[in-house]
Amino acid sequence: QQVAFDAMVEMARLGIIPSPGNEKRRANAAFVVLLRNRELADFLATMRQLEDRFNHKYHYPYIFLNDEPFSEEFMQLVAISTTSNVTFSMIPRDHWSLPDFVDPIKAAKAREQMAADNIIYGGSLSYRHMCRFNSGFFYKHPLLQSVDWYWRVEPGVDFYCDIDYDPFVYMQNSGKLYSFVIALKELKSTIPTLWQHTLEYMLNTNASSDLMSYFVSETGDYNLCHFWSNYEIASLNWLRSDAYDSYFRYLDQAKGFFMERWGDAPVHSIAAGMLLNRDQVHFFDDIGYRHEDFMHCPDTNENLGMKLKCQCPQKKNFDTSAGSCLPRWKSYSPAEWTPRDTAEAL
Ligand code: GDP
Ligand code: MN
């Protein structure tokens, strides 16, 4: 019991559990939610869980973003679902439109082809705007300029367990800059040339880290592993750094957000691989989470699920599925890697 008590004192000292007096340790952070008016009901269900499991004790504000005006009903129902601050804002037009260096006709042809090939969201232009926005623009939104940390939340996701400490403060105090709960493989057909452009960029900039090796297969190719960005707690200052932003701009110029269908998840992940070390990325094992058919639930063998009052459905953890990249996360050894290693191998 003394051990448990000491652990609590330490957590309070670090500011990762609430206690009177450590209010000031609260991180400069916000939930960031991009969504459409028609997703209101799905979001309210998610928000209910997030408030109940975490935010009614921590009161982090919500920032809602949309490419169209939010409806009155949307804003009212969201506002009465929390005691925290809520702000609604539109996305600047040039953060959600075809850049002038992309030919709209060629882009439309590319979409047609990808739709014909039955690639998920292959025919959608709005999905591409969303991926590009999440890759390179949301952190530039005026409402986020004075914020250090964000937690991305999507409508319809579930949070199954109590979150009984402050993940933002945890990140801040332990030197983390990026985090995930689910890691999986991207569909190759959505990113045919993303890796090639990344290698070019790395050769130009001489970037190297010990995390990139996590993403590289034995043949030097991208192994398609990525952290799923529908759940994300990360540093906005990292995304706003020249290093991240210049990688984004390089990719943007390569046109793959429109001529292919690059997702923000592989972009964030590969950027982390290039720019961060393994210790700066955190796997939130204790957060019970589901997006679509993919669920992560804390390990019940160690009574964590009971302690956190998890209500995970009787369903398999994605962690043990063949497509999960979590086993690799746990087993790979961080090692210096540069694209020269690949250039020589190819
Ligand atoms: P998936 O998770 O890859 O299947 O993609 P989603 O459809 O869930 O989209 C990812 C996020 O972007 C979600 O929060 C959506 O609500 C949001 N989103 C997607 N498309 C649009 C759009 O056209 N407009 C707005 N405002 N939000 C969008
Ligand atoms: Mn989604």
Image (spheres, rainbow, N blue to C red):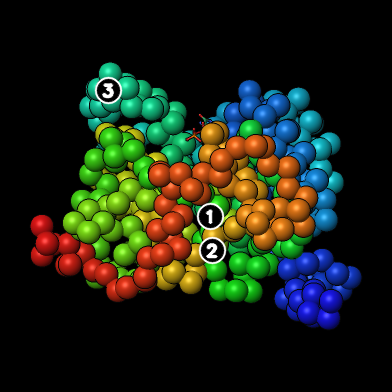
150 lies above or below 276:
above
**How far is disc 1 from disc 3 in space, using C-alphas?**
30 Å
Residue 261 lies, in percent from the top left, at: 33, 35
**How far is disc 2 from disc 3 in space, using C-alphas?**
36 Å
In-front residue for pair 52/112:
52
Residue 286 lies, in percent from the top left, at: 65, 57
- Indicate which disc, 2 or 1, sits on the residue closer to the N terminus: 1
Residue at 25% in and 31% down? 103
Q: Is residue 307 left or right of residue 20?
A: left
Disc 3: residue Cβ within 8 A of ligand 1's nearest atom: no
The secondary structure type at the circle numbered 3 is loop
Q: Amino acid at mark 2?
A: His
**In the orientation shown, which residue stands out farthest toward the right?**
20
Which label is found at residue 190? none
Label 1 crowd (10 A; few <14 / some 14-19 / many >=20) = many
Residue at 34% in and 38% down? 187
State which quarter of the image contains the N terminus.
bottom right
Which label is found at residue 180? 1
Mark 2–mark 1 contact, CB under 8 Å? Answer: yes
Q: Amino acid at mark 1?
A: Phe
Q: Amino acid at mark 3?
A: Asp
